Amino acid sequence: MKQPVRVLSDLHLGHRISRVERISALRPLIAGAGTLIFNGDTWEELARPFRDQGAAMLTELQDLCAEEGADAVFLSGNHDPGWPGCGWLELAGGKIIVTHGDALLFDGSPWKREILVNGRRVMELWNQHPDAYHDIEDRLRLAREIARTLQSCEHRKGRHFIQRAWDAAIPPRRALKIIEAWCTQATAGAEFCSRYFPKAEVLIIGHFHRQGCWRRGNRLVINTGSFMNPGRARWVQWHNGWLTCGDIDETPDSCRMGEILAVWRHDD
Protein backbone atom coordinates (compact mmCIF):
# COMPACT_ATOMS: atom_id res chain seq x y z
CA MET A 1 0.00 0.00 0.00
CA LYS A 2 1.46 3.34 -1.06
CA GLN A 3 2.20 5.84 1.68
CA PRO A 4 1.13 8.26 2.98
CA VAL A 5 -2.05 6.33 3.77
CA ARG A 6 -4.86 8.77 4.54
CA VAL A 7 -8.19 7.77 6.12
CA LEU A 8 -11.52 9.59 5.73
CA SER A 9 -15.03 8.40 6.51
CA ASP A 10 -18.73 9.17 6.30
CA LEU A 11 -18.78 11.45 3.27
CA HIS A 12 -22.38 10.33 2.54
CA LEU A 13 -22.10 11.42 -1.08
CA GLY A 14 -25.48 12.24 -2.56
CA HIS A 15 -27.30 12.78 0.73
CA ARG A 16 -29.08 16.11 0.91
CA ILE A 17 -27.36 17.07 4.17
CA SER A 18 -23.84 15.94 3.28
CA ARG A 19 -21.52 18.92 3.40
CA VAL A 20 -19.69 17.52 0.35
CA GLU A 21 -21.66 19.25 -2.38
CA ARG A 22 -18.85 19.29 -4.96
CA ILE A 23 -16.23 16.56 -5.32
CA SER A 24 -13.68 19.15 -6.46
CA ALA A 25 -13.71 20.52 -2.90
CA LEU A 26 -11.98 17.31 -1.76
CA ARG A 27 -8.93 17.75 -3.97
CA PRO A 28 -6.76 19.33 -1.21
CA LEU A 29 -7.57 16.37 1.07
CA ILE A 30 -6.56 13.88 -1.60
CA ALA A 31 -3.48 15.66 -2.95
CA GLY A 32 -0.22 14.17 -1.69
CA ALA A 33 -1.69 10.89 -0.47
CA GLY A 34 -0.37 7.60 -1.78
CA THR A 35 -3.51 5.74 -0.69
CA LEU A 36 -6.92 7.03 0.35
CA ILE A 37 -8.96 4.74 2.58
CA PHE A 38 -12.62 5.72 2.52
CA ASN A 39 -13.82 4.04 5.69
CA GLY A 40 -17.47 3.37 4.99
CA ASP A 41 -20.61 5.41 4.29
CA THR A 42 -18.82 7.02 1.38
CA TRP A 43 -21.99 7.14 -0.72
CA GLU A 44 -25.71 6.52 -0.37
CA GLU A 45 -26.01 3.06 -1.90
CA LEU A 46 -29.21 2.02 -0.09
CA ALA A 47 -31.21 5.25 0.06
CA ARG A 48 -33.21 5.38 -3.15
CA PRO A 49 -33.81 9.18 -3.10
CA PHE A 50 -30.05 9.83 -3.01
CA ARG A 51 -28.65 6.84 -4.90
CA ASP A 52 -28.29 8.30 -8.39
CA GLN A 53 -26.64 11.50 -7.20
CA GLY A 54 -24.41 9.50 -4.86
CA ALA A 55 -23.31 7.15 -7.64
CA ALA A 56 -22.44 10.06 -9.93
CA MET A 57 -20.40 11.76 -7.20
CA LEU A 58 -18.68 8.48 -6.37
CA THR A 59 -17.49 8.17 -9.96
CA GLU A 60 -16.17 11.75 -9.77
CA LEU A 61 -14.36 10.89 -6.55
CA GLN A 62 -12.69 7.85 -8.11
CA ASP A 63 -11.62 9.97 -11.09
CA LEU A 64 -10.23 12.66 -8.80
CA CYS A 65 -8.15 10.13 -6.86
CA ALA A 66 -6.76 8.81 -10.15
CA GLU A 67 -5.91 12.35 -11.28
CA GLU A 68 -3.97 12.92 -8.05
CA GLY A 69 -2.16 9.59 -8.36
CA ALA A 70 -3.71 8.20 -5.17
CA ASP A 71 -4.94 4.62 -4.86
CA ALA A 72 -8.53 4.61 -3.59
CA VAL A 73 -9.64 1.86 -1.20
CA PHE A 74 -13.31 1.71 -0.23
CA LEU A 75 -14.50 -0.15 2.86
CA SER A 76 -18.12 -1.06 3.42
CA GLY A 77 -20.37 0.86 5.79
CA ASN A 78 -24.00 0.52 6.78
CA HIS A 79 -25.01 3.01 4.07
CA ASP A 80 -22.86 1.36 1.37
CA PRO A 81 -22.60 -2.34 2.28
CA GLY A 82 -22.05 -3.48 -1.30
CA TRP A 83 -18.30 -2.96 -1.49
CA PRO A 84 -16.37 -6.18 -2.11
CA GLY A 85 -13.72 -7.29 0.32
CA CYS A 86 -13.54 -8.16 3.97
CA GLY A 87 -14.57 -4.74 5.33
CA TRP A 88 -11.41 -3.90 7.26
CA LEU A 89 -7.74 -3.14 6.67
CA GLU A 90 -4.62 -3.72 8.74
CA LEU A 91 -1.73 -1.26 8.92
CA ALA A 92 1.57 -1.53 10.80
CA GLY A 93 1.54 -5.29 10.67
CA GLY A 94 -1.91 -5.52 12.25
CA LYS A 95 -1.27 -3.04 15.06
CA ILE A 96 -3.68 -0.59 13.40
CA ILE A 97 -7.15 -1.70 12.28
CA VAL A 98 -9.39 0.38 10.03
CA THR A 99 -13.09 -0.52 9.80
CA HIS A 100 -16.30 1.48 9.57
CA GLY A 101 -17.62 0.79 13.07
CA ASP A 102 -21.16 -0.56 12.75
CA ALA A 103 -19.85 -4.02 13.66
CA LEU A 104 -18.86 -2.69 17.10
CA LEU A 105 -22.52 -2.75 18.12
CA PHE A 106 -24.79 -5.78 18.33
CA ASP A 107 -27.47 -4.11 16.20
CA GLY A 108 -25.24 -1.90 14.07
CA SER A 109 -27.20 1.36 14.36
CA PRO A 110 -29.42 1.01 17.45
CA TRP A 111 -30.74 4.58 17.03
CA LYS A 112 -32.42 3.81 13.69
CA ARG A 113 -36.21 3.68 13.82
CA GLU A 114 -36.24 0.45 11.82
CA ILE A 115 -34.00 -1.23 14.41
CA LEU A 116 -35.77 0.26 17.42
CA VAL A 117 -38.94 -1.56 16.40
CA ASN A 118 -37.33 -4.72 14.95
CA GLY A 119 -35.05 -6.00 17.67
CA ARG A 120 -36.40 -9.49 17.14
CA ARG A 121 -35.30 -9.42 13.50
CA VAL A 122 -31.76 -8.45 14.55
CA MET A 123 -31.68 -11.46 16.89
CA GLU A 124 -32.89 -13.71 14.07
CA LEU A 125 -30.03 -12.53 11.87
CA TRP A 126 -27.52 -13.21 14.65
CA ASN A 127 -28.94 -16.71 15.04
CA GLN A 128 -28.24 -17.28 11.35
CA HIS A 129 -24.59 -16.26 11.88
CA PRO A 130 -23.40 -18.08 15.03
CA ASP A 131 -19.76 -17.78 13.96
CA ALA A 132 -20.04 -13.97 14.07
CA TYR A 133 -19.42 -14.08 17.82
CA HIS A 134 -15.78 -15.05 17.22
CA ASP A 135 -15.06 -14.82 13.46
CA ILE A 136 -14.45 -11.33 12.08
CA GLU A 137 -15.31 -12.19 8.48
CA ASP A 138 -18.72 -13.52 9.49
CA ARG A 139 -19.18 -10.57 11.84
CA LEU A 140 -18.74 -8.13 8.95
CA ARG A 141 -21.02 -10.18 6.72
CA LEU A 142 -23.66 -9.99 9.44
CA ALA A 143 -23.20 -6.22 9.75
CA ARG A 144 -23.85 -5.85 6.02
CA GLU A 145 -26.93 -8.04 6.25
CA ILE A 146 -28.35 -6.00 9.14
CA ALA A 147 -27.77 -2.83 7.12
CA ARG A 148 -29.57 -4.18 4.07
CA THR A 149 -32.43 -5.88 5.91
CA LEU A 150 -33.20 -2.96 8.21
CA GLN A 151 -32.37 -0.05 5.94
CA SER A 152 -34.13 3.27 6.46
CA CYS A 153 -37.56 3.49 4.85
CA GLU A 154 -37.94 7.25 5.38
CA HIS A 155 -35.44 10.03 4.77
CA ARG A 156 -36.04 13.34 6.49
CA LYS A 157 -36.15 16.39 4.28
CA GLY A 158 -34.90 19.10 6.61
CA ARG A 159 -31.38 20.50 6.26
CA HIS A 160 -31.42 23.01 9.12
CA PHE A 161 -29.97 22.18 12.52
CA ILE A 162 -33.28 22.60 14.39
CA GLN A 163 -35.02 20.22 11.99
CA ARG A 164 -32.20 17.69 12.36
CA ALA A 165 -32.21 18.01 16.16
CA TRP A 166 -35.97 17.44 16.25
CA ASP A 167 -35.59 14.39 14.02
CA ALA A 168 -32.93 12.97 16.36
CA ALA A 169 -35.03 13.62 19.47
CA ILE A 170 -38.22 11.95 18.26
CA PRO A 171 -38.98 9.41 19.56
CA PRO A 172 -37.08 10.10 22.80
CA ARG A 173 -35.73 6.56 22.85
CA ARG A 174 -33.88 7.35 19.61
CA ALA A 175 -32.11 10.33 21.18
CA LEU A 176 -31.10 8.22 24.18
CA LYS A 177 -29.63 5.56 21.87
CA ILE A 178 -27.60 8.19 20.01
CA ILE A 179 -26.18 9.62 23.24
CA GLU A 180 -25.46 6.14 24.60
CA ALA A 181 -23.57 5.23 21.41
CA TRP A 182 -21.50 8.41 21.56
CA CYS A 183 -20.58 7.79 25.20
CA THR A 184 -19.69 4.10 24.81
CA GLN A 185 -18.08 3.91 21.36
CA ALA A 186 -14.53 3.88 22.73
CA THR A 187 -15.25 1.05 25.16
CA ALA A 188 -17.09 -0.84 22.43
CA GLY A 189 -14.09 -0.35 20.14
CA ALA A 190 -11.65 -1.72 22.70
CA GLU A 191 -13.89 -4.75 23.33
CA PHE A 192 -14.23 -5.30 19.57
CA CYS A 193 -10.43 -5.44 19.25
CA SER A 194 -10.11 -7.79 22.20
CA ARG A 195 -12.52 -10.20 20.54
CA TYR A 196 -11.44 -10.02 16.89
CA PHE A 197 -8.03 -8.29 16.72
CA PRO A 198 -6.24 -9.01 20.01
CA LYS A 199 -2.86 -7.68 18.85
CA ALA A 200 -4.31 -4.37 17.63
CA GLU A 201 -3.13 -1.23 19.39
CA VAL A 202 -5.23 1.27 17.40
CA LEU A 203 -8.75 1.11 15.97
CA ILE A 204 -9.84 3.73 13.40
CA ILE A 205 -13.60 4.03 12.88
CA GLY A 206 -16.35 6.36 11.69
CA HIS A 207 -20.06 5.49 11.82
CA PHE A 208 -20.96 7.29 15.06
CA HIS A 209 -20.63 10.81 13.58
CA ARG A 210 -18.80 11.80 16.75
CA GLN A 211 -15.11 12.55 16.24
CA GLY A 212 -12.53 11.97 18.94
CA CYS A 213 -9.56 10.00 20.28
CA TRP A 214 -9.82 7.87 23.41
CA ARG A 215 -7.60 5.50 25.38
CA ARG A 216 -9.14 2.33 26.74
CA GLY A 217 -6.52 0.26 28.50
CA ASN A 218 -3.65 -0.30 26.08
CA ARG A 219 -5.74 0.57 23.02
CA LEU A 220 -6.38 3.81 21.19
CA VAL A 221 -9.74 4.34 19.46
CA ILE A 222 -9.95 7.11 16.85
CA ASN A 223 -13.19 8.27 15.25
CA THR A 224 -12.80 10.43 12.14
CA GLY A 225 -16.28 11.92 12.46
CA SER A 226 -18.42 12.71 9.43
CA PHE A 227 -19.29 15.22 6.74
CA MET A 228 -22.91 15.45 7.97
CA ASN A 229 -24.05 17.98 10.56
CA PRO A 230 -23.77 18.14 13.50
CA GLY A 231 -20.70 15.90 13.23
CA ARG A 232 -17.32 17.29 12.26
CA ALA A 233 -14.74 15.55 10.08
CA ARG A 234 -11.13 14.62 10.82
CA TRP A 235 -8.32 12.98 8.87
CA VAL A 236 -5.92 10.27 9.96
CA GLN A 237 -2.64 9.51 8.21
CA TRP A 238 -0.15 6.66 8.43
CA HIS A 239 3.35 7.42 7.11
CA ASN A 240 6.79 6.02 7.90
CA GLY A 241 5.73 4.61 11.26
CA TRP A 242 3.88 7.72 12.40
CA LEU A 243 0.13 7.92 12.91
CA THR A 244 -1.26 11.45 12.78
CA CYS A 245 -4.76 12.81 13.39
CA GLY A 246 -6.04 16.28 12.60
CA ASP A 247 -9.03 18.49 11.92
CA ILE A 248 -10.42 19.15 8.45
CA ASP A 249 -10.87 22.81 7.56
CA GLU A 250 -14.05 22.98 5.48
CA THR A 251 -15.56 25.57 3.20
CA PRO A 252 -18.12 24.89 0.45
CA ASP A 253 -15.29 25.11 -2.10
CA SER A 254 -12.40 23.45 -0.28
CA CYS A 255 -11.70 20.82 2.36
CA ARG A 256 -8.13 20.83 3.65
CA MET A 257 -6.03 19.06 6.24
CA GLY A 258 -6.14 21.40 9.19
CA GLU A 259 -4.54 21.48 12.62
CA ILE A 260 -2.67 18.38 13.75
CA LEU A 261 -4.24 17.21 16.99
CA ALA A 262 -2.09 14.22 17.94
CA VAL A 263 0.82 12.08 16.73
CA TRP A 264 1.72 8.52 17.75
CA ARG A 265 4.62 6.24 16.86
CA HIS A 266 3.83 2.66 15.82
CA ASP A 267 6.59 0.53 14.37
CA ASP A 268 5.74 -2.38 12.10
Image (cartoon, grey):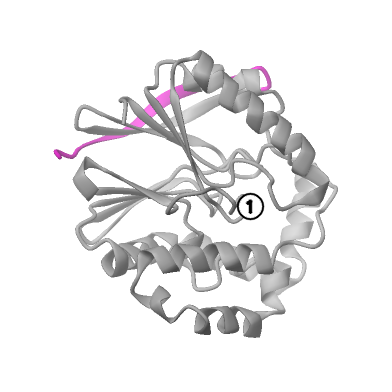
Query: Horizontal and vertical percent for residue 36?
Result: 44, 30
Let me know if residue 127 is in the magenta part.
no
For badge 1, the amino acid type reads His
Residue in the foreground of this view, choosing between 125 and 179 = 125
Which residue appears at 65% of the width and 81% of the height? 121
Q: Which quadrant would residue 241 be assigned to in this image? A: top left
The region drawn magenta spans: 252-268
Q: Main secondary structure of the magenta part?
A: strand
Residue in the foreground of this view, choosing between 49 and 179 = 49
Residue 72 in sight from this viewpoint: yes
Which residue appears at 45% of the width and 52% of the height? 87
Query: Horizontal and vertical percent for residue 156?
Result: 82, 53
Which residue appears at 37% of the width and 61% of the height? 189
Farthest residue to the left: give it: 267
Query: Horizontal and vertical percent for residue 22?
Result: 69, 23
Which part of the image, by quadrant, shows the N terminus?
Answer: top left
Classed neighbour count for the residue bearing mark 1: other residues with Cα under 10 Å, few (<14), some (14–19), many (≥20): many
Query: Horizontal and vertical percent for residue 120?
Result: 64, 85
Which residue appears at 65% of the width and 63% of the height? 148
Farthest residue to the right: give it: 157
Which part of the image, by quadrant, shows the C terminus?
Answer: top left
Side (left or right) of 201 relative to 138: left
Q: Is residue 89 above or below residue 26?
A: below
Residue 20 in sight from this viewpoint: no
Mark 1, residue position:
79
**Number of labelled discs?**
1
Provide the secondary structure element on which disc 1 rests. Answer: loop
Side (left or right) of 22 relative to 28: right
Side (left or right) of 153 relative to 27: right
